[in-house]
Amino acid sequence: MPGSKEHPGDSGSPDDALGIVLADTVRGTGASIGGLYLIEDAEPVLRLVALCGLPMAFSAPWQRLPLTAPVPVTDAIHDDALVSIAGQDEMARRYPRAAAVLPYPFALVAAPLTGVRRSWGGLVLMWPAGRPRRVTPREHGHITSSARRMARLLDDATRPPSLPDQPRVVPVGTTRHPAQTGLAAADYLERLPEGALALDLEGRITFATAAAARLLGRGADRLLGTRPWHSLPWLDDPVVEDHYRTAIVSRAPVSFTALRPPDHSLTFQLYPDASGISVRVLPSAEQTEHATPPTGARPPAAAPTGRLYQLVHLAAALTESVTVRDLVALIAHQILPAFGAQGLVLSSVDAGRLKIIGHHGYPPDAVERLDALSLDTDLTPAGQVLASGTPAFFADPGELAANYPRAPQISGKQAWAFLPLIISGRPVGCCILSYTRPHTFTADERAVLTSLSGLIAQALDRARLYDTKHRLVHELQRALLPRALPRLPGLDVAARYLPAGHGTEVGGDFFDVLRLNDTSAAAVIGDVEGHSVAAAALMGQVRTAIHAHATAGAAPGQVLARTNRLLADLDSELLVSCLFVHLDLGRHRASLASAGHVPPLLRQARHPAGVLDIEPGPLLGIDTGTDYPVTTVPLLPGTTLALYTDGLVELPGTDATRTTTDLAAHLDTADGHDLERLIDRLVRHTTPTGQHADDIAVLLLRASRLGDGTA
């Protein structure tokens, strides 16, 4: 509650109180690392807003995550349940992409922040490698209680929480013994023959004994405030930095040996905790033979390990982008922040021109001027970059204007990276990252961006092919479904078809409403087995057959029986579920026949909604001699009949019967005045994330008084 003693620091905004609860949770559960994610309202993205026990640089690959990303926290939000990872083996098995970026021994739990009316985000906790492998009931209760507390803070806040570009680092706090003075501790360490260093969580040296300085060959004044792999050239190796990262993430002791030229082998023992790392420096018992580096020579600078892991993370993410829209969102939300860039232009090569297919951080007039430029234009280096196949980097407008005088004037940006997108020698496009301020590109940035350009090119080629196939598939789907539903006196109608979230196979779900005469109509919904062109073709034939039999005056059972015989004549191996409804609007009744279809929902005025009990016949295509029973129900004004396909209720990990009953209860409480909005509510109720593995078709029928068209 704002201003209460329970949540100090909350004065209308929950930001401070959330940080306090996060730190309390980390301490109370014995976790070493904690992170708080909130969902952005503008788009389905998680933003890391608070962080405990981990340096800011470590969080770079995880600061913005699509809600569809295959990581524990998104699964916890989707399933509204705790996700527990016992160790690195389980992480590699269940979340290989995350494991590639965090190849360290640790345990992890992710919990959803579920409020009264919405999901706010998720909580992530990590433990050292030595922790018991499973969450205890007491820990489970502590974590879920903390998640509920955070959700209540967000529910009760008088204004929305802030979503900073960088997460706030929240101190956990450690207990020290005040009687033990720093001077006494320093004197104790100076008396030991071994060297001692203290590093903060960022890897900077905060204390060094004289013995450590002697063993490292550099004065303490030149070591303090530096990272060892920066101030000591012979430790400038990604492996050394990785040992530090391992200690920070796993909170387990780490030991390694390094050669101080020319022939001094030193052992480094790292002991981490929540405040930093204590390092023992010892002469190695065994001196390893190494070639002495030439005088004055220094190995080429290697990319920091963090950058290498970041490349692995981004590469894995690029392999998962499916559409061009996915790819643009990935570059904008993960690659731009990773390199501190603010602008993006993604273009594809089309008939000698660069057609912009995605952009971010540019005003519309600049995009219009940049779109469809010729490859040989002097307004941008993009054409030259594609011709040479070599990226171009410009640290400020002066560098770019030297060869392309008009280019800086188009966008007003101050630094640029032009990345050619080439596959097997074939240019497919160009990716431009831009900055609002001058930016010097380091050697490792250039190397990583050059590597990424090849991965982006492959992702773009795949995405364009997918989009083309997807567009063709859904154009076929739309052609097979009715373009519009008839307007009938005494009947309000609304329908929706939602294809599966991803895929380039056409589905077999179908629906139709037929006007039979002035006072009667027919409605049908069905689902052909499978997702293929064959399923779509059969769906069109079934829909045509039902239309013909219904308009010829056949009863509901006869319509299905005759269509069933047609399937036998077609010799199709595919089966079809179908529900046919004859609507007698003059007599206010509906007659239904089912061929193995999911039961409809019925809501009558002043009666609770429920699942309509219909005796089903077999699926179409099984037995040509079968009969289909008919069920008749009243259809008084105000009655709503909901027909749907199994994609709405048959969800992975759920019981379809229970889901259907729950959906009926939701239909009972939802406002049914606007049928289109009612469909939205029904779909959102069973698939709140908007992701569904199967096609969904919904057809709502509501009886109204003849002549008025309203309920």
Image (cartoon, rainbow, N blue to C red):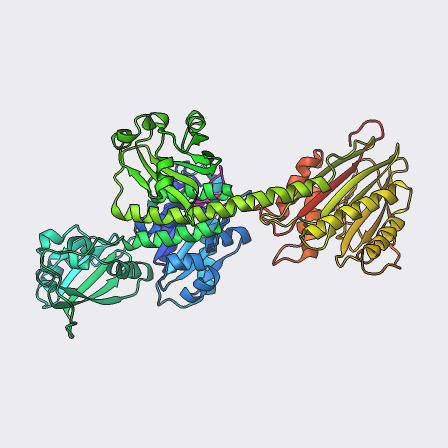
Question: Per the image, is 623 magenta?
Answer: no
Residue 130 in picture, x, y percent from top left: 35, 68
Up-down relation of residue 368 to residue 335 (above or below): above
Would you say residue 337 is visible in this rendering? Answer: yes
Question: Quick one: 595 or 77, which is closer to the camera?
Answer: 595
Residue 113 in picture, x, y percent from top left: 48, 49
- What range is drawn magenta here? 37-46
Up-down relation of residue 620 to residue 360 (above or below): below
In the picture, residue 128 is in which quadrant?
A: bottom left
Up-down relation of residue 9 to residue 625 (above or below): above
Up-down relation of residue 565 to residue 128 (above or below): above
Q: Residue at x 82, y 38 (%)?
A: 514
Q: Is 120 displayed left or right of 289 in the figure? A: right
Would you say residue 135 is visible in this rendering? Answer: no
Question: Quick one: 621 or 291, which is closer to the camera?
Answer: 291
User: Which quadrant: the N terminus?
Assistant: top left
Question: Per the image, is 38 magenta?
Answer: yes
How many tags in the picture? 0
- Pick out the residue farthest to the bottom: 286
In the picture, residue 583 is in which quadrant?
A: top right
Residue 252 in picture, x, y percent from top left: 30, 65
User: Which quadrant: the C terminus?
Assistant: top right
Q: Is 206 displayed left or right of 35 in the figure? A: left
Residue 366 in picture, x, y percent from top left: 41, 27
Q: Residue at x 90, y 46 (%)?
A: 555
